[in-house]
Image (tube, coloured by chain):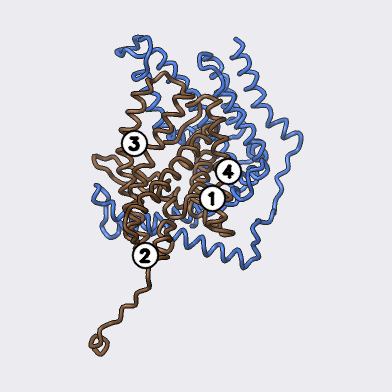
Chain colours: A blue, B brown
């Protein structure tokens, strides 16, 4: 519980990307990814342009590239899937090194990898430059239902408390000589998860009572307004505008 | 099972986003019936629990391990509406802060795991519960069967979406067979874990298990008197 206030991915900084209101960042990110996904995968150059645009944003944000690259491991299962694609897809075959693979599958694998990687990198940049609290404000401004934002707020606020609880249970198990190596360990792990559920749920009940005693009536008070200046709107528009130009060119060519 | 960006085409992603938004909207109303004004803190903590429980590794052997998906488990523990909300929020946080699952695929992921996974689990659970004797101990097998069925059904739903908007020419028959075969195995693990977790909760706090409420309500209060000589001793 003595951890810092940012979440795992957050990289503290004061760049224009960090300072930009979260709702603008979300809009910019979402339109960028939609454009990337909509671009025909045969236009290889377009994806290079997208990658350069994204690299520009990362450079402005001052988040070290290695910091983001290391976090791209979330992509691994999906890379495996993309790598299998040329072997299972149908259609005319081509020779690549020692393998005979499907041409259409190869193209599909490239498309998946390019689009997926750009998506992961863009989301990681958002995560690295946005505090959870600002993200919630941003989502609220984008008219996500109030109730859903509240649920998300509670989840993010207590995520580390709950995962810490899990960590303490693991240390307690291990200090009794427990190592999970086979299916025989499952009952112990299952009751760990059961205990975690009961503790989390009861914590939720205590939080609710604490909120009631402080006058909770279904809405949380707004303590901080995330307003955006026209200049920030213009800044946030640069990335989608350039991406839009790229996408239009890619479709037209 | 997190679908990334670019896996399905834009129209399919938009379509599933509309389905997901409708489902979550309905769940926001339904959850108020399950939890009234406790919805926000409780669904939030359940979401944190699901997120943490997915981090718990269950060793399968030979150095590999699996983890819980949690759709059916959440449905049995807190009811389908709250479970839908919790899973949707978990996916939202994973997508926005951990880049796990694409943002344009968020609707697809919520539809598959939050709607298909949770509701298949819940409907199967209720059906099996109706067939089995009305006892609290029967909640555990019913939950396990629900978890077992929900995983391949979600995989089948994914195959259906892929047939509509997939981005690679994989023959549908073999994709469906591979997905079903693989996810039946995953479903077995999910069933075992779900059963173990539900039985652990039922043993301590059966009143917390949403799926056990109906059975608990019909249970008679039994007062067991101690034997006379034991009291004297």
Q: Which residue is mark 2?
A: B204
Mark 2 secondary-structure assignment: helix
Q: Using the image as rendered, state which of residue A108 and residue A117 is in the foreground.
A: A108
- Residue at 40% x, 44% y: name it: B69
Q: How many marks?
A: 4
Q: Which mark is residue A156?
A: 1
Q: Are marks 4 and 2 in contact (CB under 8 Å)?
A: no
View extreme (right): residue: A230
Q: Residues within 10 Å of mark 2 (few under 14, many from 20)?
A: few
Q: Which mark is residue A12?
A: 4
Question: Disc 1 to disc 4, how far (Cα)?
Answer: 18 Å
- Residue at 38% x, 59% y: name it: A195
Number of the front mark, 1 or 2 = 2
Q: Which mark is residue B96?
A: none
Mark 1 secondary-structure assignment: helix
Figure check: A95 above or below B73? above
Question: Disc 4 to disc 2, how far (Cα)?
Answer: 43 Å
Mark 4 secondary-structure assignment: loop
- Residue at 61% x, 44% y: name it: A135
Residue A39 percent across, percent down from the top left: 56, 19
Whether marks 1 and 2 lie on the same chain: no
Quadrant for residue A54, please give it: top right
Sequence-earlier tag: 2 or 3: 3
């Amino acid at each position: 519980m003595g951890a810092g206030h940012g979440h795992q991915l957050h990289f503290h900084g004061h760049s224009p990307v960090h300072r930009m209101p979260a709702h603008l960042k979300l809009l910019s990110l979402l339109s960028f990814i939609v454009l990337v996904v909509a671009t025909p995968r045969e236009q290889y150059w377009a994806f290079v342009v997208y990658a350069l645009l994204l690299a520009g944003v990362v450079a402005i944000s001052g988040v070290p590239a290695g910091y983001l690259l290391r976090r791209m491991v979330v992509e691994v299962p999906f890379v495996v899937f993309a790598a299998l694609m040329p072997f299972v897809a149908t259609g005319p075959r081509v020779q690549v090194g020692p393998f005979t693979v499907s041409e259409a599958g190869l193209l599909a694998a490239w498309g998946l990898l390019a689009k997926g990687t750009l998506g992961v990198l863009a989301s990681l940049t958002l995560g690295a430059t946005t505090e959870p609290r600002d993200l919630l404000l941003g989502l609220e401004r984008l008219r996500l239902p109030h109730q859903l934002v509240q649920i998300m707020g509670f989840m993010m606020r207590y995520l580390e408390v709950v995962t810490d609880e899990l960590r303490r249970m693991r240390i307690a198990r291990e200090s009794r000589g427990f190592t999970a190596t086979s299916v025989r360990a499952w009952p112990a792990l299952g009751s760990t998860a059961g205990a975690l559920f009961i503790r989390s749920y009861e914590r939720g009940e205590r939080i609710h009572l604490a909120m009631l005693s402080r006058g909770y009536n279904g809405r949380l008070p707004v303590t901080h307004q995330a307003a955006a200046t026209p200049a920030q709107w213009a800044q946030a528009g640069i990335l989608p505008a350039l991406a839009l130009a790229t996408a239009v060119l890619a479709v037209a060519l | 099972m997190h679908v990334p960006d670019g896996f399905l085409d834009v129209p399919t992603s938009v379509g599933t986003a509309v389905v997901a938004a409708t489902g979550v909207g309905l769940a926001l109303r339904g959850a108020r019936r399950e939890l009234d004004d406790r919805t926000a803190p409780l669904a939030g903590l359940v979401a944190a629990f699901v997120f943490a429980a997915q981090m718990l590794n269950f060793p399968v052997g030979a150095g590999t391990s699996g983890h819980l998906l949690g759709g059916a488990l959440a449905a049995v523990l807190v009811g389908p509406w709250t479970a839908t909300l919790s899973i949707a929020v978990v996916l939202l946080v994973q997508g926005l802060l951990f880049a796990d699952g694409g943002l344009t695929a968020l609707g697809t992921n919520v539809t598959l795991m939050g709607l298909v996974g949770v509701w298949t689990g819940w409907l199967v659970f209720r059906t099996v519960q109706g067939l089995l004797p009305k006892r609290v101990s029967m909640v555990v097998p019913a939950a396990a069967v629900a978890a077992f069925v929900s995983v391949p059904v979600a995989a089948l739903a994914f195959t259906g979406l892929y047939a509509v908007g997939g981005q690679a020419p994989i023959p549908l028959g073999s994709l469906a067979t591979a997905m079903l075969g693989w996810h039946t195995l995953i479903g077995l693990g999910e069933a075992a874990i779900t059963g173990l977790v539900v039985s652990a909760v039922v043993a301590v706090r059966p009143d917390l298990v949403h799926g056990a409420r109906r059975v608990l309500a019909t249970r008679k209060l039994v007062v067991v008197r101690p034997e006379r000589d034991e009291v004297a001793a």
